[in-house]
C-alpha cells in the first residue's frame, strides 16, 4: 500500500524506557541521522542517577528528547509530539507532558499485569479509555524483535535487548530518516561481536519494514532541512564541546593541558573525553579527591601548563581553599563547574544554576576571579577557549559555569576552522625585571593587564618563592604591612574588574521593547524561544544574555537603564537578579524555577506575556 | 633511563642555596639544623638551582621554601603532595621536594600523602616530625604519644599515634627512611639515597620543637643514652646496637616480626628486599617511647614512577601522531558524523 506523506515543520520525540533499555543510545542515533538530514535540532537526555534502578519502576525511567525542525530551534521542545514508551513506567512518567493528540507508541509486550502493578496501574491504560485523548499505536516491540531475530543465531536475551533498534527503525521510517550511519555505528559498537552487529541491524530493518507494511501506521512524515549557515556541522553535547575547547586552548596557546579531576556527575565525561587526547600533550590525572585534583592542576600551572580541573558544585566547595591560593598566587587555572541540583548531593543528574553565588563569592577573604558561562551545548567550546584566554592572559583562576542541561544536551555545531580560533600564546618571564637589571620581582605587574610575570621553574636566574601568605607588592616577599595588604586586596579586585570583556548584546528586532529579559548560561535557549513567540504575537520584548558574570560587561548598567522593566529568569532563587539589583540599583524582577528541569519556553512565554502587558 | 634533569655547569656551594630571606623559626628550633644540612647538601646533586623546587604546606616546617634559593611554593595545609604531583608529572626536568610536618602530612593532608606514595610520584618528601603542632602553639599531633598533655588535651590525648614509616609502607612507598635533625652526617646520607631514588622517597626527620615539645627525642640524641636505644641501619650489615653491639635485631622462629635481644644472631639489613613485610617489621621496633629506634634507609626498591608512566603514555601518543597540532585539531573537530550544507 502507498503511504501518505505529510510535511511537518517541527517534531518533538521523546524516547522513554527502563534505564537498561538503551534509550540514550536510541535517542543519540536518531539525533545523528536527523542532524545529517540537515534539520536543526536540540536534545535533552533525562536519566536517573542510579545506573540500573529497579526494572520497570518509575524511578528507573530514562528518556531522551529530540526536537528537530526545518527552522532554527532553541530548545529541546516543551511537549513531545511523539512518545515512545517501552514499558508502563515510561508511559506513566511521561504522560503528563503530552499535549492532546500526541502520538504514543507503546511496547505492548511489557504491559503485563506485574509491570502494570509496579507503577500502580490497576488495569492496563491500553484497555480503557484513559488514553483516548492521544493517538496510541500499540506495537509488540519485544516479541516482534525476537521473532525477526529467530534465525540470527543470538540468545533470546540478546534478541530482546535489540528491541530499541526495532523502535529506532520504526521511528526512522516514520520520519523519513536516513539510516546508513546507524548501520555503520552498529558495526563499530559491536566490532568484537559480529553476531550482535547482525542482530541489531536486523532488528533495525525489521522496525523499518514494520512501519512500511503495517496498516497501523498510515502516515509518514517529512521535515525538510533547515536553512542553516553554510558549512560543515556535527552534532555535539556540551561536555564534548567543552573538552574539545580545552584541547583547542592547548593547541592555540602552545601549552600542555593538565587536567586534574575526580569523577563526579555530570562532569566526568569531560575527563573521559580529554583522556583520549594525549597526542595533543593533554595529561589527565584522576586524583584521589577533588582537592588533589585542583591542587595538581595548580601545580601544573605553576610549572607552565594550562591547569584545568573539572567538577560539579560539591567539588567546587571542596576546591575552594585551593582556588583562593590560586587567587593569591595569580596563576592561570580553569575550574569547570558543571552545575547540578543541590545542595549537598541533591539531584546529581538534574540541572540547576545555583552555583553562581558559589563561583562569585564562595571563597574566604576577598578572592575575586573571573566567571564565564556557556549558553548552549556548542557554545561550551567557545566558553572553554574564553576561560583559557582570560586565565592565561590575566593570570587568574577562571570558573566556567556549565550545567547539566547544556552538558548533556546536544545541538548542531558549525565547525570552526582552527585559524579562526583565538591566539592564546603567552610569554613566560625569562629575564630579571628589576630596575637594577639583576633582581626578579615576581609581583611586578604588567601595566596593560595587571598580570604578574609567569616565571616557571627551570628559568635560570628567576628563582623565587611564592605562597599563600600575603605578599609585598612587586617583590612578593612575605608582608604583614597594613597598607600593603590593603593595596594588594584592592589590586586583586581591580585586576579582575579591568579584564576587558565584550559588551552585552541586546536582541530587540523592532527596537520598541520596554521589557528586557536578562539571562545567563543555559537559559538562553528557552528565553530566546519565549521571546520569539511573544514577538510573533506582536508583543515587543528585548533579550540580553550574559556570558561573563565576572567581570560584567561594561555596558550592562546602561542597557538595564534603558528599559522600564527588567526580568531575570534563573534556575535558582534569584542569584543574578540580586547581584544586578545591588550593583545597578535597578528593580530587576526575579523569575525562578528550581525543579531540576530547564525552563520550558511556554513557562517563560506565559510569565513574560504578563510582564509585557502590564509594563 | 637517563634523568631528564640537567646537570649544573658550575659547581655550586651551600651558600648558593641560601635565599635573601631572614629565617624566622624560634631560636633553638631543630629546623635550623635541617635547613643548614640541606643547603650544604644540595650542591652534591649537581642540579641547577632553577631546576629544584621546594613545595610545602602549612606549619613551621613549611616555611622552609622561603629560605632556599630555588623555586618554591608555600602552599596550603596538607596539599603540598597534590600540588607537587601536578608539577612533577608535567615537568620531569625538575627535581621536586616536598617539605611537610606531622600535622600537615599525617593529619590534614594524610590522603594526599598516601596517594603520592601509592602512585610513586617522583617526589622527595621530607617529613619534619616533632610530634606537636608548633605554629598553632602547642596542640597534640597525630604522632604525639597517647596521653599527651597539651592545651587542647588538658587531661591527656585519647588517640593512638601513627607510626609514619609503617603508614608509608602500607601506602606502597618504595623508599622509606628516618633520620634526626641533629645528626647532620646521617641526615645528609639519607638525603643522598633519597635523591638517587626514582619515585617517591619518604624521609621522616625527627625534629626538636624546643618551645612546645622540647627534648622529645633526647633518649636517642643524648650521648649518655643514645647508643643503647638508637639502631643504625646499614645496607648489608648485621643490625646490632648498644655498647659493644650487645643488642641484636633478630627474627625469632615462628614470629612474623623482628625483635631485639641481647646476643643472638642479628639479621643482615637489606633495604632492597621486595617484600615490604621486612621493612614494616623494622618500623615496628620503635614506638612512642623510642627505646629501640632504627634510623637509616628501611626500604629502597624499584618500581616505575607515576611520572615515568604518564610521560611514556604521552610520548607514545605523540609518536603515533601525524601532522601539526593545528592539523590534528582540525581533524579532531571534524571527527564523527558530520554533514555539510551549501
Image (tube, coloured by chain):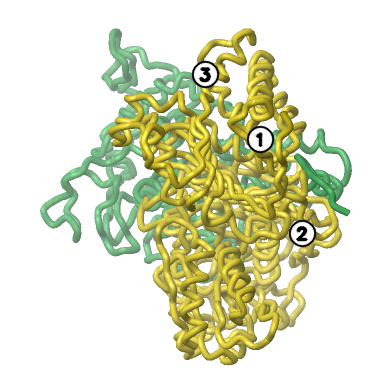
Which residue position holds label 2?
Answer: A253
Q: Are marks 2 and 1 on the same chain?
A: no
Residue shown at 45%/29% (left/top)? B298
Residue in the foreground of this view, choosing between A339 and B21? A339
Q: Are marks 1 and 3 on the same chain?
A: no
Q: Measuring from the top left, give residue A588's x and y in whole percent.
A: 47, 83
Q: CA distance from mark 1 to mark 3?
A: 54 Å
Q: Measuring from the top left, give residue A104's x and y in whole percent.
A: 51, 40
Task: Please identify, in this view, whether the residue under mark 3 or under mark 2 is nearer the observer.
Answer: 3
Q: Chain coloured yellow: which letter?
A: A
| Above or below, comparing residue A544 to residue B295 in the picture | below
Name the mark on residue A143.
Answer: 3
Residue shown at 75%/36% (left/top)? A178
- Total marks placed: 3
Question: Tags 1 and 3 in contact by the CB under 8 Å rule?
Answer: no
| Above or below, comparing residue B124 to residue B267 in the picture | below
Can you name the residue that lies furthest to the front here? A1
Amino acid at each position: 500500500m502507498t503511504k501518505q506523506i505529510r510535511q511537518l515543520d517541527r517534531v518533538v520525540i521523546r524516547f522513554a524506557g527502563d534505564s537498561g533499555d538503551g534509550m540514550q543510545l536510541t535517542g543519540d542515533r536518531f539525533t545523528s541521522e536527523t542532524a545529517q538530514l540537515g534539520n536543526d535540532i536540540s536534545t535533552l537526555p533525562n536519566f536517573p542517577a542510579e545506573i540500573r534502578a529497579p526494572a520497570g519502576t518509575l524511578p528507573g525511567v530514562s528518556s531522551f528528547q529530540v526536537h528537530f525542525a526545518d527552522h532554527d530551534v532553541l530548545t529541546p521542545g516543551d511537549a513531545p509530539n511523539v512518545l515512545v514508551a517501552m514499558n508502563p513506567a515510561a508511559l506513566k512518567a511521561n504522560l503528563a507532558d503530552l499535549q492532546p493528540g500526541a502520538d504514543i507508541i507503546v511496547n505492548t509486550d511489557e504491559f503485563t499485569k506485574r509491570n502494570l502493578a509496579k507503577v500502580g496501574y490497576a488495569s492496563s491504560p491500553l484497555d480503557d479509555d484513559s488514553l483516548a485523548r492521544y493517538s496510541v499505536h500499540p506495537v509488540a516491540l519485544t516479541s516482534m524483535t525476537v521473532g525477526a531475530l529467530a534465525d540470527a543465531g543470538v540468545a533470546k536475551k540478546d534478541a530482546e535487548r535489540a528491541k530499541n533498534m526495532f523502535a529506532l527503525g520504526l521511528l526512522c521510517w516514520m520520519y523519513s530518516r536516513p539510516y546508513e550511519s546507524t548501520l555503520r555505528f552498529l558495526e563499530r559498537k559491536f566490532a568484537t561481536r559480529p553476531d550482535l552487529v547482525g542482530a541489531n541491524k536486523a532488528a533495525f530493518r525489521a522496525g523499518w519494514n514494520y512501519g512500511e507494511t503495517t496498516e497501523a501506521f498510515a502516515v509518514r512524515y517529512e521535515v525538510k532541512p533547515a536553512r542553516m549557515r553554510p558549512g560543515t556541522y556535527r552534532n555535539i553535547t556540551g561536555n564534548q564541546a567543552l573538552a574539545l575547547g580545552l584541547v583547542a586552548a592547548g593547541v592555540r596557546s602552545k601549552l600542555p593541558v593538565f587536567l586534574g579531576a575526580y569523577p563526579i556527575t555530570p562532569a566526568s565525561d569531560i575527563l573521559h573525553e580529554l583522556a583520549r587526547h594525549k597526542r595533543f600533550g593533554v595529561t589527565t590525572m584522576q586524583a584521589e579527591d577533588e582537592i588533589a585534583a585542583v591542587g595538581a592542576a595548580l601545580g601544573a600551572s605553576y610549572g607552565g601548563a594550562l591547569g584545568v580541573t573539572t567538577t560539579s558544585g560539591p567539588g567546587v566547595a571542596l576546591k575552594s581553599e585551593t582556588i583562593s591560593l590560586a587567587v593569591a598566587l595569580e596563576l592561570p587555572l580553569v575550574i569547570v563547574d558543571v552545575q547540578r541540583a543541590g545542595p549537598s548531593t541533591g539531584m546529581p543528574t538534574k540541572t540547576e544554576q545555583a552555583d553562581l553565588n558559589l563561583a562569585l563569592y564562595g571563597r574566604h577573604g576577598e578572592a575575586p576571579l573571573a566567571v564565564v558561562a556557556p549558553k548552549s551545548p556548542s557554545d561550551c567550546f567557545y566558553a572553554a577557549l574564553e576561560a583559557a584566554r582570560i586565565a592565561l592572559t590575566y593570570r587568574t583562576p577562571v570558573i566556567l559555569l556549565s550545567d547539566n542541561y547544556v552538558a548533556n544536551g546536544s545541538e548542531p555545531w558549525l565547525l570552526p576552522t582552527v585559524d579562526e580560533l583565538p591566539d592564546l600564546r603567552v610569554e613566560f618571564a625569562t629575564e630579571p625585571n628589576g630596575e637594577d637589571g639583576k633582581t626578579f620581582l615576581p609581583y611586578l605587574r604588567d601595566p596593560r593587564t595587571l598580570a604578574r610575570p609567569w616565571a616557571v621553574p627551570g628559568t635560570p636566574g628567576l628563582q623565587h618563592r611564592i605562597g599563600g601568605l600575603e605578599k609585598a607588592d612587586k617583590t612578593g616577599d612575605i608582608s604583614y604591612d597594613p597598607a600593603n595588604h590593603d593595596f594588594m586586596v584592592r589590586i586583586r579586585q581591580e585586576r579582575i574588574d579591568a579584564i576587558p570583556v565584550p559588551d552585552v548584546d541586546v536582541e530587540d528586532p523592532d527596537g520598541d521593547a520596554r521589557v528586557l529579559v536578562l539571562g545567563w548560561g543555559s537559559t538562553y535557549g528557552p528565553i530566546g524561544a519565549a521571546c520569539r513567540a511573544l514577538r510573533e504575537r506582536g508583543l515587543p520584548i528585548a533579550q540580553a544574555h550574559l556570558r561573563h558574570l565576572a567581570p560584567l560587561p561594561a555596558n550592562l548598567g546602561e542597557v538595564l537603564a534603558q528599559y522600564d522593566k527588567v526580568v531575570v529568569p534563573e534556575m535558582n532563587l534569584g542569584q543574578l537578579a540580586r547581584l544586578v539589583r545591588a550593583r545597578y540599583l535597578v528593580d530587576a524582577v526575579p523569575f525562578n524555577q528550581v525543579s531540576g528541569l530547564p525552563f520550558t519556553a511556554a513557562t517563560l512565554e506565559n510569565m513574560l506575556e504578563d510582564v509585557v502587558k502590564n509594563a | 633511563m637517563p634523568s631528564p634533569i640537567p646537570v649544573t655547569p658550575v659547581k655550586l656551594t651551600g651558600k648558593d642555596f641560601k635565599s635573601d630571606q631572614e629565617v624566622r623559626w624560634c631560636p633553638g628550633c631543630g629546623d635550623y639544623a635541617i635547613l643548614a644540612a640541606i643547603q650544604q647538601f644540595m650542591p652534591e646533586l649537581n642540579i641547577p638551582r632553577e631546576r629544584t623546587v621546594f613545595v610545602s604546606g602549612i606549619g613551621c616546617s613549611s616555611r622552609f621554601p622561603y629560605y632556599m634559593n630555588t623555586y618554591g611554593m608555600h602552599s596550603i595545609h596538607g596539599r603540598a603532595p597534590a600540588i607537587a604531583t601536578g608539577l612533577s608529572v608535567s615537568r620531569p626536568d625538575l627535581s621536586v621536594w616536598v617539605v611537610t610536618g606531622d600535622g600537615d602530612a599525617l593529619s590534614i593532608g594524610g590522603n594526599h600523602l598516601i596517594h603520592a606514595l601509592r602512585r610513586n610520584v617522583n617526589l622527595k618528601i621530607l617529613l619534619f616530625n616533632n610530634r606537636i603542632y608548633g605554629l598553632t602553639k602547642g596542640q597534640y599531633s597525630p604522632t604525639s604519644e597517647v596521653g599527651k598533655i597539651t592545651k587542647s588535651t588538658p587531661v591527656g590525648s585519647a588517640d593512638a599515634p601513627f607510626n609514619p614509616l609503617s603508614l608509608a609502607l602500607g601506602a606502597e612507598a618504595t623508599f622509606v627512611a628516618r633520620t634526626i635533625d641533629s645528626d647532620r652526617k646521617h641526615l645528609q646520607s639519607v638525603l643522598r639515597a633519597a635523591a638517587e631514588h626514582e619515585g617517591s622517597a619518604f624521609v621522616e626527620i625527627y625534629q626538636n620543637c624546643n618551645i612546645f615539645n622540647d627534648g622529645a627525642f633526647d633518649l636517642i640524641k643524648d650521648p649518655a643514652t643514645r647508643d643503647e636505644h638508637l639502631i643504625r641501619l646499614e645496607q648489608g650489615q648485621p643490625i646490632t646496637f648498644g655498647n659493644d653491639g650487645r643488642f641484636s635485631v633478630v627474627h625469632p622462629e615462628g614470629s612474623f616480626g623482628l625483635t631485639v635481644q641481647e646476643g643472638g644472631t642479628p639479621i643482615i639489613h637489606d633495604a632492597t628486599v621486595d617484600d615490604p613485610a621486612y621493612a614494616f617489621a623494622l618500623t615496628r621496633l620503635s614506638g612512642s617511647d623510642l627505646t629501640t629506634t632504627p634510623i637509616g634507609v628501611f626500604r629502597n626498591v624499584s618500581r616505575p614512577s607515576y611520572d615515568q608512566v604518564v610521560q611514556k603514555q604521552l610520548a607514545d601518543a605523540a609518536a603515533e601522531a601525524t601532522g601539526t597540532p593545528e592539523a590534528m585539531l582540525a581533524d579532531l573537530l571534524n571527527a564523527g558524523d558530520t554533514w555539510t550544507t551549501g
